[in-house]
Image (cartoon, coloured by chain):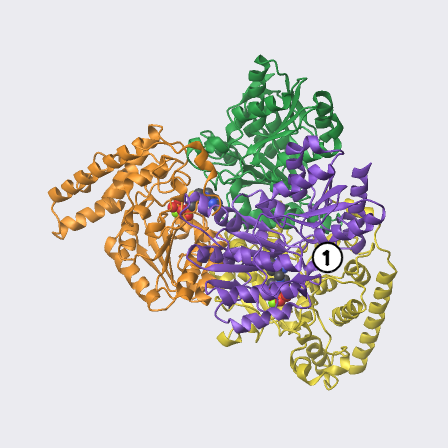
Chain colours: A yellow, B orange, C green, D purple
Amino acid sequence: MLLIRHFEEALVALHEQGHFSGHYHVYIGQEATGVPALADLAPDDALFATHRNHGHLLARGADPGRLFAEILGRRDGYNKGKGGTFHIAAAGLGFYHTTGIVGGNIPLATGAAYAAKTRGTGALSVCLFGDGAMEEGAAPEAFNIASLWKLPVLFLCENNGKYGANKAVGAAQSSTMAAYPLTELPGLYKIPAVQIDGTDVGAVFNAVSEATGRIRRGEGPQFIEAQSVRWPGSEGNWPVLPVATNVNLAWDASPVPESKRDWYRSSDPVLIFIRELVAAGVATREQIAEVEKSVKAEISQAVQFALASPFPEPAEALRDVFA
Amino acid sequence: MLLIRHFEEALVALHEQGHFSGHYHVYIGQEATGVPALADLAPDDALFATHRNHGHLLARGADPGRLFAEILGRRDGYNKGKGGTFHIAAAGLGFYHTTGIVGGNIPLATGAAYAAKTRGTGALSVCLFGDGAMEEGAAPEAFNIASLWKLPVLFLCENNGKYGANKAVGAAQSSTMAAYPLTELPGLYKIPAVQIDGTDVGAVFNAVSEATGRIRRGEGPQFIEAQSVRWPGSEGNWPVLPVATNVNLAWDASPVPESKRDWYRSSDPVLIFIRELVAAGVATREQIAEVEKSVKAEISQAVQFALASPFPEPAEALRDVFA
Amino acid sequence: MRQMAYFEAKLEALREIISADESVHFISDIGTGFLGLSEHRVRFGEIARDFPDRVIAPPISELAFCGLAIGAAMSGLRPVVDLITASFAFEAWPQIINEAANARYMSGGQTQAPVVFHLLHGLRGAGAAQHSQSPQAMLWNCPGLEIVLPASPRDVKGLLKTAVASNNPTVFIDHVLLFECMGDVSENDAAIPFGQAEIKRKGADVTVVATSYMVQRSLAVAEQLAKEGIDVEVVDPRTIVPLDFATIMASVEKTGRVVVVDECHMSCGVAAEIVARIAESGFDKLKAPMRRVATLDVPVPYSPPLEDFISPTEARIAQAIRATMN
Amino acid sequence: MRQMAYFEAKLEALREIISADESVHFISDIGTGFLGLSEHRVRFGEIARDFPDRVIAPPISELAFCGLAIGAAMSGLRPVVDLITASFAFEAWPQIINEAANARYMSGGQTQAPVVFHLLHGLRGAGAAQHSQSPQAMLWNCPGLEIVLPASPRDVKGLLKTAVASNNPTVFIDHVLLFECMGDVSENDAAIPFGQAEIKRKGADVTVVATSYMVQRSLAVAEQLAKEGIDVEVVDPRTIVPLDFATIMASVEKTGRVVVVDECHMSCGVAAEIVARIAESGFDKLKAPMRRVATLDVPVPYSPPLEDFISPTEARIAQAIRATMN
Ligand SMILES: Cc1ncc(C[n+]2csc(CCOP(=O)(O)OP(=O)(O)O)c2C)c(N)n1
Ligand SMILES: Cc1ncc(C[n+]2csc(CCOP(=O)(O)OP(=O)(O)O)c2C)c(N)n1
Ligand SMILES: [Mg+2]
Ligand SMILES: [Mg+2]
């Protein structure tokens, strides 16, 4: 989780320094969903992420250097610089295809599950998407098929809009959806669906283990809505850091500008987890600070790796269209 | 209803005689839905039908001669022969656009309702579609918007698959749908939804009046699922008449080939209604036979009109692309 | 050599393909699969019956079932999806254009999606505006898709085999009016490699480049015009991605006269691209302006004489060929 | 005459349009409407604030909200829908291609759908394969849609007005890299009729037909080449449906040399159609083979040097122009 946080924060800095220019999205605020959710999967499970994929890749063990390199468009990036931030694929980790089209991965993940089931591999497929994807017709269409054909797919909807736009109706959506809670839509298609606190590592781990267990026992698709509170750095179209995270914020959020302090104080999943670890006596503050130190060193090495990686030769653009 | 029945039966004959060649669909078996449903609408209400539109047009008072002419590709057809059976439009009757794309009219009807609401005309919009359309993502997407924006639209789903393909799950769908009954999907989007017997004229009339009443009082979209049993003449890809309907079948179905007799005996909405009328003393058998006679005369005149109508000049093909 | 009807060759190919490779699945309506509204459509049911675990009928959810096929292809299957009428492929456009076509490239070559989308395109008679489309030009404008347009019994069989064996997403675009066409198909007919045009008729005076059903129509016109002393060469690219431009150019160099016949709408259609390429590379070989015969730029009307008027008919093909001779 | 930035002219047009006609509704995100990711995007919020009943933000349901706009247009409104990135228009393809484009025709002229779809197309810098598409060629292959490609502050304002006033479905395709471009816009700028090309630069040696952002790029190249003694004429069709082919041909007759520059992928792109038309009608006027400069036929890569390599850059435009002079 700390690795993801520091990765994304370093990325914001790289963007501000002009090392890459396009639109991008960070996973800050959702670390407690991705990390425990992907902790327990099998090596041949397939994963389909979205524009907000960096955290998923890292949670699955991706090399931060090659991730940075991809986002910087460099030759050593996972996709040779061809995919970029929206499309990071790492087939070796089960990320075959990452889409920038909202809802686009829901049919694809359902298809990977169809392959797993009919080939009898015992693998499952995980579809990671935001609450916004529930507004696309692709979602109910794919839920229907996944349910009818009892496909081994976990739909993991990261609703980062808790207390969001639709607060008025008491729901937790980042945008306009009459069907809430979001679990009702898959539920309608007879897909077991639960809503959980996506900032609670234990809750996520348990819900995902339970769901994947059911899937592997042949019970068909499962749906989890993991709620989190939108990180205040993503209010504009480009991420802006309210503060550089360090583990001490877990006990003293005063370095955060007041208007954004609340989030760090009560909704930041990384800081919540740190407090939990310390409270449970699993680690001391000092140990955690040590971990952070080594994470930061790893990130800074990874940044160096990426910056040192050359841009691909221009003619590389002509390769990989067809087999 | 008799007019629709005899229209469609005459059409099957015209097809068999080679007067038109394309794929087409008839409304036989659903007459008790379309007729009462459209009986009570206002002149400026908008209607959006599908490939199975002939009955809707007739129920709304379309001229059978011009309908036949359209289906035969003749100059006097409602669309000058350009639309044909799938696309009969009659703007004067509120049929602006009839689509052959399953689910395609659901967003369109929602849009007409948006126009009616924002222009304050007091009109509503009626979307007529089959159970199959519920499988297209266009349906939930449009339901969501119609509900959020409280649009004056009646979604009238004609489920002609009662005891159909999905009998196994106890549902009434013509094809594969995990979300049943069909009323649950609009219900999820907070659209009031009822399931009714689409072969019961009174039930349809009451349900539609109630729904349109609510819509006109500003309560937003409403959904009705009208169930009917698939006519056995539509088992193949082209309609085939098991028998030429005449009102006497209401009391004696023996002229129908045995394998298809059941439908005429218990599921034919036209014959059901005739028996009701007689039982209620509203009409005698003889009066109904008289009506049928005049309907048949009207249909045969309409056929003559259509056959006498010339084909459009070829260069007509170049007109009506742009204003 | 066996004489065989086109639809029989197609069915034979489907059966051989699903028999030979466990990873092949057909996602298709059982009652009409791959044969649309033709009277032979029920014949697909025999295959479905013999491979019940590998032929599956989806709901009316083109976007999702095409996406499903793409995802399954990424995970090791070779799904063949029947979209029936080509117009319904628009429902799945986001998955075909944004996902399938880009998957290999965006991933830097890590991922492949060997899916086949099967469509029936074109003017089929009274299909009207929403059931007569020819999306091959739109698809050609989207790099990353192979596009196959068979025109003979031998080609439909051989190209279908190559399509399923290909490691790329492939759009297999067929035409219902070809189904009754007869032709030679050898017992052990081999797969036909993509990117190999076939000279369907040798001729010295005019090169006609035609695709799909227009190949058959152009051949008929060529016979007619032979009587007028015009010797037409008919070149069938068979696949437009990849395109065997060398064979086309060799013919152009020989004849110096070009007509391109294609059933897409005219503007930005397949004929536009072929004419543009020849204009760029073969300008000095041309003895006369090139001509395109395509569907006129109006939505497809329902009424037969109107449909005929906008269609690339034999009369319009003949007229275009004659025009190049003046 | 006022000098004005392109995005300002566009905002001014939007405000004037919604002020002038009660039946205009904007279906659009409030925070970014019509300006995509440009830094000025929040400026649309001012209009939304002033017309709260006629600017409405839809869910992420492109298919439904485009269909809604079409249906509303059939019932008397003039909706303008912002699809943001052009690639998202594929989600609404069934409604745009099958419903909007065919409505008037299929109904035999009874129904009209005066809707405007607004898209931002093209290579915008690191948009990668799914956020850089240029769907205008696909759309041109679908009769029934007007297609507008503005390239200057005056044009964006004048053409937007005509688009909304038009009784046909219109696709308004803009380019975010034009937004900072400055130009003259008169206070009471009139609507610019569709189907009137503009000679953006007069020249005697080579005709460059360019659209959208490629007009600005071609103008820059023309200035460069003037120093080499090559006098380039830049013709901007401004709308491709309807197309002012007469103005293009008049220029071709004068220069005898043609380069077409367009940001669609090459095959079946806009440049293909323009080259094909000239090849058919202007064959005897040409002194050299025509050249196309378009996006190379590969998905759009993310990395800047790769994106640049496949893009219709100034260097490639200049090279193509020089090639026609030999
Ligand atoms: C089909 C499509 N429409 C619109 C967009 C533009 N877009 C990018 S991210 C986004 C919001 C998505 O919200 P959500 O799914 O909740 O993901 P989050 O960004 O909150 O993680 C939108 C609308 C898109 N990428 N694809
Ligand atoms: C998008 C799309 N997919 C497929 C079809 C082919 N098709 C025509 S009618 C039909 C069945 C529709 O079922 P339903 O909506 O229940 O209507 P019914 O024919 O039963 O009245 C299908 C699949 C189509 N017209 N459009
Ligand atoms: Mg979200
Ligand atoms: Mg039905």
Front-most of residues D23 and C102: D23
Residue A152 can be seen, yes or no? no
- Looking at the figure, which quarter contains the C terminus of chain D? top right
Quarter-wise, where is residue C257 in the image?
A: top right
**Amino acid on which the number 1 mark rests in the picture:** Ile
Q: Is residue A17 visible?
A: yes
Q: Which one is nearer the viewer's eye here, C285 or A32?
A: C285
Where is residue B165 drawn, in percent x and y? 41, 46
- Ligand 2, image quadrant it occupies: top left
Q: D226 or B202, which is in the foreground?
A: D226
Where on the picture, by quarter, is residue B17? top left
The answer to whether B157 is drawn above or below residue A178 in the figure is: above
Quadrant showing the N terminus of chain D: bottom right
Spot the residue most to the right: A308
Give the residue pinned by disc 1.
A88
Q: Position of residue A74 (x, y in %)?
A: 82, 56
Characterize the local packing of mark 1: few (<14), some (14-19) or many (20 or more) Cα atoms within 10 angstroms. Answer: many
Q: Chain of mark 1?
A: A
Q: Secondary structure at mark 1?
A: loop
- Which residue is at a point 79% across and 62% down the rendered structure image? A68
Which residue is pictured at 64% across the width and 43% down the height?
Answer: D247
Q: How many marks?
A: 1
